[in-house]
């Protein structure tokens, strides 16, 4: 099996695959069985978990900073009426999202966007559905200050934290100079958020070599995902996101996503960030506006190929999937969720739990 062999032979197989793929293209349906097995092995290797979480030089990991960030993340002290924390919307056992089509505003209405999962953001550069945030650090005060969100002005947030003895101590432990500043709140929250990494799922046991970890349908779904259905063109790598922005041909309406920042570039109209697919079966409904209720409905959308328009990605077009192939794709997506019970229950949401 290709993914089990080490060193020189593995690189050789990669070279072989590169020359093969140039000739025949990925996952030709009519490829001989033996070649399919090799392709599957090579693909599997692309999804291996990285060895370490990357932290930027400007905000290196320290345990004290991560602990402070964890505490801030779960603490309603950062909302005007002390009734909301980051974890009110980014709920650990809902895949670090909230299970709603669109986030709840303060007046029991809906915001325009769905709450995205916070899983595996350490590997993403641009954040927000439209990429409006350049760093993880720069996100935090957007929800804190948002009048319909946590509704707390920065000065009041910093005053509350410096007057709290516990926080004053925690800032002094985390930073050489104990003053509570906006930058330090951002640094601590981002350090904690980079630790939010998905747990191993049946899919990971399978790519590590346990053939019994997932069913045959899911394995066929994996082949489709990487081959005929072209999903991996955008949902690539271990977290199943290229971190980039695409129009998948479904959005209509006034929110044109990343196109807002590039009015001169028609290709970015309706482009939204590719979401990672870890724990995806736990986070219905789907898309930036929560418009798609189930994974089955997501697959139907891709099968239809979406609206033909200049912005639609060239990787999106009608797929002609048989009903059994659609079911295989869904079976595969379900293998990306960790076992139930491995994520903390809602009742556990205190500043002392959970440790991702
Ligand atoms: C009312 C629900 C709500 C609360 C509370 C909330 N968020 Fe969010 N979060 C959202 C929504 C909605 C978005 C999408 C915003 C966008 O794309 O412009 C988001 C986006 C994010 C992102 C970007 C994720 C990505 O995939 O690009 C991060 C990081 C984040 N929030 C962190 C936080 C932190 C830290 C807090 C607390 C300080 C917080 N959020 C509080 C709803 C919420
Ligand atoms: C051209 C790039 C591209 C291709 C190809 C692609 N996707 Fe996506 N996918 C995206 C983007 C971008 C979104 C978010 C769109 C939005 O929010 O409106 C998305 C959203 C999703 C979602 C919803 C996730 C969530 O948290 O809301 C799922 C599930 C999904 N894709 C699965 C697939 C599958 C399965 C395939 C193959 C049949 C596929 N994708 C092909 C880019 C792509």
Image: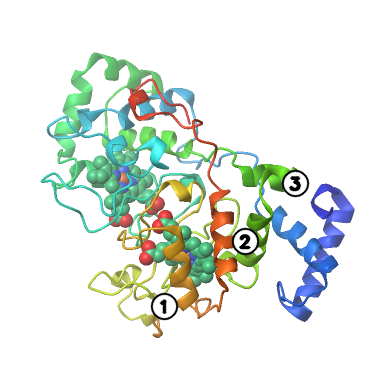
Task: Measuring from the top left, give residue 151's x and y in whole percent.
Answer: 15, 41
Ligand 2 neighbours mark 3 (CB distance < 8 Å): no
Mark 1: secondary structure: loop
Which picture quadrant has residue 149?
Answer: top left
Q: Is residue 127 visible?
A: yes
Q: Which quarter of the figure has residue 181?
A: top left
| Residue that numbered label 1 is attached to | 306
The answer to whether 122 appears left or right of 116 in the picture is right
Work out how far the residue at label 1 is from the one at label 2, CA to CA, in angstroms.
21 Å
- Residue at the spot of label 2: 221
Q: Residue at x 35, y 30 (%)?
A: 346
What mark, if any, has residue 211 been given in the picture? 3
Q: Residue at x 58, y 48 (%)?
A: 335
Work out whether 10 lies above or below 23: above
Label 3 or label 1, whichever comes before in sequence order: 3
Q: Is residue 139 visible?
A: no
> Residue 201 location, x and y as percent?
59, 42
Tell me if residue 326 comes above or below residue 215 in the rendering.
below
Compute the Cα span from label 3 to label 2.
15 Å
Mark nearer the N terminus (1 vs 2): 2
In which quadrant of the rendered view does residue 32 lie?
A: bottom right
- Mark 3 or mark 2, which has the lower sequence index? 3
């Amino acid at each position: 099996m290709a993914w089990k062999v080490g060193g020189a032979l593995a690189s050789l197989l990669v070279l072989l695959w590169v020359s093969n793929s140039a000739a025949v293209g990925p996952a030709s349906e009519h490829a001989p069985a033996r070649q399919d097995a090799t392709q599957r092995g090579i693909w599997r290797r692309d999804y291996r978990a990285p060895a370490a979480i990357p932290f930027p030089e400007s905000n290196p990991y320290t345990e004290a900073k991560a602990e402070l960030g964890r505490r801030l993340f779960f603490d309603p002290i950062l909302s005007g009426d002390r009734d909301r924390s980051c974890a009110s919307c980014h709920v650990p056992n809902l895949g670090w999202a909230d299970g709603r089509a669109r986030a709840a505003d303060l007046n029991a209405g809906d915001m325009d966007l769905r709450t995205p999962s916070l899983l595996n953001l350490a590997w993403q550069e641009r954040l927000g559905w439209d990429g409006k945030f350049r760093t993880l650090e720069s996100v935090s005060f957007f929800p804190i200050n948002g009048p319909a969100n946590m509704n707390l002005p920065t000065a009041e947030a910093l005053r509350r934290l410096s007057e709290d003895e516990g926080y004053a101590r925690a800032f002094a432990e985390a930073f050489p100079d104990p003053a509570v500043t906006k930058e330090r709140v951002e640094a601590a929250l981002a350090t904690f958020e980079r630790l939010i990494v998905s747990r191993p799922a049946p899919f990971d046991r399978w790519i590590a070599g346990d053939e019994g970890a997932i069913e045959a349908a899911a394995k066929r779904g994996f082949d489709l995902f990487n081959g005929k259905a072209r999903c991996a063109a955008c949902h690539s790598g271990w977290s199943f996101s290229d971190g980039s922005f695409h129009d998948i041909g479904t959005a209509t309406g006034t929110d044109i996503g990343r196109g807002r920042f590039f009015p001169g570039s028609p290709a970015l109209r309706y482009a939204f960030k590719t979401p990672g697919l870890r724990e995806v079966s736990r986070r219905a409904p789907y898309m930036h506006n929560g418009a798609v209720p189930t994974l089955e409905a997501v697959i139907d959308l891709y099968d239809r190929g979406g609206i033909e328009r200049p912005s639609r990605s060239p990787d999106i077009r009608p797929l002609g999937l048989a009903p059994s192939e659609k079911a295989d794709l869904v079976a595969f997506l379900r293998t990306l969720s960790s076992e139930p019970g491995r994520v903390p229950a809602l009742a556990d949401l205190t500043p002392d739990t959970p440790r991702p």
